Image: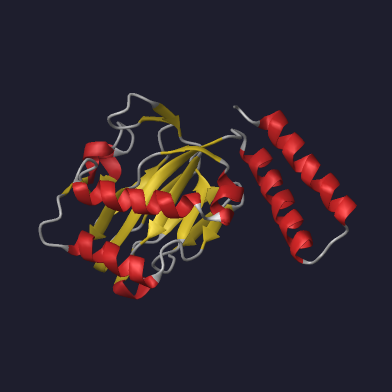
Amino acid sequence: MLLTIPQVLNAEQLRAARARLDAADAPWVDGRVTAGYQGAPVKRNQQIEENSRTALELGDLILGLLERNPLFISASLPAGVYPPMFNRYEGGMHFGNHVDGAVRLVPGSGAKLRTDISATLFLAEPSEYDGGELVIEDTYGSHSVKLPAGDLLIYPASSRHRVLPVTRGARVASFFWVQSLVRDGEQRRLLFELDQAVQRLTAGGGDAEALLRLTGTYHNLLRMWSDT
């Protein structure tokens, strides 16, 4: 399931984040430092050092906002989130076709996280750069995505995807992975659709008994399918 979650960062938060990332002393490094054997040959970008103060503080901001974002929670059912990282593409930089690694070691914790869902939070407006589209391939074909700054895209980590070359300006984004309580993507999609329907019926004053039954069905399915 591909899903856009709008305005994860508001205008003020976005300005503050970009100011930190655009600072001349920001510790940008070669993006291949975090690439696996598959990704390294086709990865050409820059990243903020994972353990830098900039990355840690901005990552905490993003995680705090996502914890309170009902659409993100409903769609991903997070059991764990890899600390957000930050990248930049400019001057022809790109990331060729690849599939994200299935398991990542969370820095400094020794814990391992299964990457069920990939996430890209766009931090530069589309007008700031040419190219840089995130192209995701699934059973329905290729999807080219270039969202407004502050918007988040989530998609299956099992998908083959790439970032097209940036030919003008700079594409700045945050990226991370989610381990879901529900491993299977189709089960997550069904739970999401059911949850959204329950929320809409609740807001519209739907029949209380029917809503109770639907809500019970949702939680019983989650109980059945959850890894936890």
Give whichever of 122, 90 is nearer the camera. Answer: 122
Indicate the quadrant containing the C terminus: top left, top right, bottom left or bottom right: top right
Position of 107 relative to 7 (above/below): above
Toward the bottom, the furthest residue is 127
Write the residue at 35% across / 46% down.
84
Asked if residue 202 shows in the view, the reply is: yes
Position of 37 relative to 137 (above/below): above
Position of 130 relative to 33 (above/below): below
Write the residue at 35% across / 42% down.
83
On the rendered structure, is 147 left or right of 228? left
Write the residue at 25% across / 57% down.
88
Image quadrant where residue 149 sits: bottom left
Write the residue at 35% across / 58% down.
164
Image quadrant where residue 216 sits: top right
On the rendered structure, is 73 left or right of 207? left
Task: Give residue 222's position: percent from left, percent from top.
Answer: 69, 36
Toward the left, the furthest residue is 25
Task: Give residue 105's position: percent from left, percent from top.
Answer: 35, 28
> Which color mode does the image show?
secondary structure
Task: Give residue 129's position: percent from left, percent from top.
Answer: 30, 70
On the rendered structure, is 54 left or right of 84? left
Task: Give residue 69's position: percent from left, percent from top.
Answer: 52, 55
On the rendered structure, is 58 left or right of 209? left
Give whichever of 87, 202 is nearer the camera. Answer: 202
Asked if residue 44 shows in the view, the reply is: no
Toward the top, the furthest residue is 110
